[in-house]
Image (tube, grey):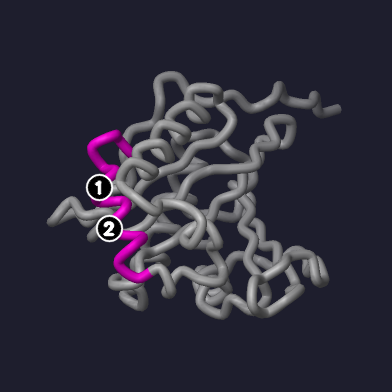
Amino acid sequence: MQTKPTPWRRPEPWPGSVHTERLVLRWYETEDAGPLYEAVSSDREALLPWLPWAQTGHSSVAEAVETIERFTRLRTEGADFTIGAFDRETGAVVGGTGFHRLVPDAHEAETGYWICGARQREGLCTEMTRAWISAGFRDWGFRRIILRCAGGNVGSRGVIEGIGIPAEACEREARWIDGAGWDDQLVFGVLEREWDCENQRMR
């Protein structure tokens, strides 16, 4: 008879940064506020309507500082872990990812992603997501990682399906999209035993 494991707890010490061929995934620091603001404000329309925070937040460098301070506070509290994606050569902010909506009893976390408008359609989102899922299983100790996207978000859905993560549910008209109305929310999930961390792909 199997014994239920104890709830997930974040690793001690914190996992380090993740390096891919073109990216470094690490915590945002205060000095990243300017580059974060530039990444969002350079082409806000490219992030809409799927990421409403692109319109309602990051309206100034000062606001980006406040956002990074909030990320740090939530991380310290163990409630949410937001990660920046930086160009490995230039150090510029190109996007972000993280682990959110934690379910410690199930050793589960949700991940998501965004890439600034100028760097979209370069395959960076797929590169980042493969590496981050691997880190989630290898370094963070999660057992299950889920991803959600709006049914109409063809780009985001394409990333998930391209990696081969199985679809789990379609929550009908569960998400409001400004300018489009109610849209389905698609749920995808991958288990640790299904993922090859070394090669960053489904087994």
Residue stretch in magenta: 28-43
In the image, farthest residue toward the right: 1
- Viewer-proximal residue, 11 or 138? 11
Q: In the image, residue 78 lies at what x, y percent?
A: 55, 26
Amino acid type at circle 1 is Gly
Crowding at dot 2, Cα within 10 Å, few <14 / some 14-19 / many 20+, comes out as: many
Q: In the image, residue 155 lies at what x, y percent?
A: 51, 77
Q: Residue at x 36, y 57 (%)?
A: 95
Q: In the image, residue 57 lies at what x, y percent?
A: 47, 52
Residue 34 is marked as 1
Crowding at dot 1, Cα within 10 Å, few <14 / some 14-19 / many 20+, comes out as: some
The N terminus - image quarter: top right
Residue 139 is marked as none
Q: Residue at x 40, y 44 (%)?
A: 83
Residue 38 is marked as 2
Q: Residue at x 39, y 43 (%)?
A: 63
Marks 2 and 1 close (CB-CB < 8 Å): yes
Q: Toward which corner of the image does residue 62 lie, by quadrant?
A: top left
Dominant SS type (magenta):
helix
Question: SS of the residue at dot 2?
Answer: helix
Disc 2/disc 1 C-alpha distance (Å)? 6 Å
Q: Residue at x 53, y 26 (%)?
A: 10
Q: In the image, residue 191 lies at what x, y percent?
A: 63, 50
Amino acid type at circle 2 is Glu
Residue 102 is left or right of residue 130, and the answer is: right
Image height of 122 relative to 103, above or below:
below
Question: SS of the residue at dot 1?
Answer: helix
Is 151 one of the magenta-colored residues? no
The C terminus - image quarter: bottom right
- Viewer-proximal residue, 125 or 54? 54
Residue 198 is left or right of residue 30, and the answer is: right
